[in-house]
């Protein structure tokens, strides 16, 4: 949490827009955080920055901002056609403790406004992305807890 706060303060101080930290990894005392832009409450996955923070001093020792710098712009039309309840019908009823939010995901060279549903199945956490314009399921990812942190695959 302290590394995330340090990374977000660093980015804010350098003019990066509002960001959140959904994932991180730890390597030999170095925390690598994935910071993702948020526009009007929508998580914009194409606009992400990796920030490396020393865990002992909270110093920023590396930043990889290629995705953010090449794709960041104000997005238009972040209003879903398909409501959250209608989109929820496209996910498995076996997922438990489901939460949702709007996000923009990159896929096949395009961006799609989706409902991101996070839920649990048999002790694992899954992300299910349902297109907020068509109601069709676009992607499923499993959150993997490793000895170095959290990753989606």
Image (cartoon, rainbow, N blue to C red):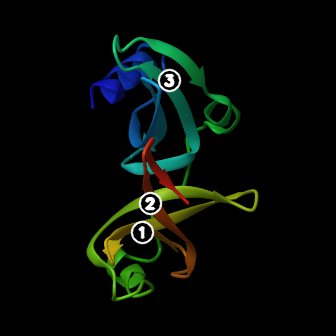
Tell me the residue that label 1 is attached to: 126
Residue of label 2? 143
Above or below — where is 54 with respect to 27? above
> Tag 3's secondary structure?
strand
Label tally: 3
**Disc 1 crowd, CA 10 A, few/some/many (<14, 14-19, 20+):** many
Counting from the top left corner in percent of width and height, residue 134 is at 56, 80
Q: Which residue is mark 3?
A: 52
Asked which quadrant contains residue 64, the reply is top right
Secondary element at tag 2 = strand
Question: Residue at position x 61%, y 36% from top?
Answer: 72
Tag 1 near tag 2, CB within 8 Å: yes
Q: Tell me the element at label 1.
A: strand
Tell me the CA gap for discs 2 and 3.
Answer: 21 Å
The residue depicted at 76 percent of the width and 57 percent of the height is 109
Residue situated furthest right in the rendering: 109
Cα–Cα gap, marks 1 and 2: 6 Å
Q: Nearer the viewer, residue 13 or 7?
A: 7
> Which tag, 1 or 3, sits closer to the chain's start?
3
User: Which part of the image, by quadrant, shows the N terminus?
Assistant: top left
Q: Which mark is residue 1?
A: none
Instruction: Check the image and report above or below for 140 versus 52.
Output: below
Q: Nearer the viewer, residue 40 or 147?
A: 147
Q: Is residue 96 left or right of residue 141?
A: left
Contact (Cβ within 8 Å) of mark 2 with mark 3: no
Q: Position of residue 96 (x, y in %)?
A: 27, 78
In the depicted structure, whether residue 108 falls above or below residue 20: below
Note whether residue 152 is visible.
Answer: yes
């Amino acid at each position: 949490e302290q590394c995330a706060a340090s990374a977000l303060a660093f980015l804010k101080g350098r003019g990066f827009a509002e960001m959140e930290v959904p994932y991180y990894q730890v390597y030999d005392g170095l925390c690598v955080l994935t910071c993702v832009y948020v526009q009007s409450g929508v998580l914009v996955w194409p606009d992400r920055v990796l920030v490396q923070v020393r865990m002992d001093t909270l110093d920023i020792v590396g930043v990889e901002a290629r995705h953010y710098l090449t794709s960041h712009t104000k997005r238009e039309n972040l209003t879903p056609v398909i409501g959250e309840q209608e989109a929820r019908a496209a996910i498995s009823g076996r997922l438990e403790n489901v939460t949702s939010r709007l996000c923009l995901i990159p896929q096949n060279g395009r961006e799609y406004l989706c409902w991101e549903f996070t839920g649990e199945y048999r002790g694992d956490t899954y992300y299910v992305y349902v297109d907020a314009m068509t109601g069709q399921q676009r992607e499923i990812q499993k959150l993997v807890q490793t000895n170095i942190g959290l990753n989606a695959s």
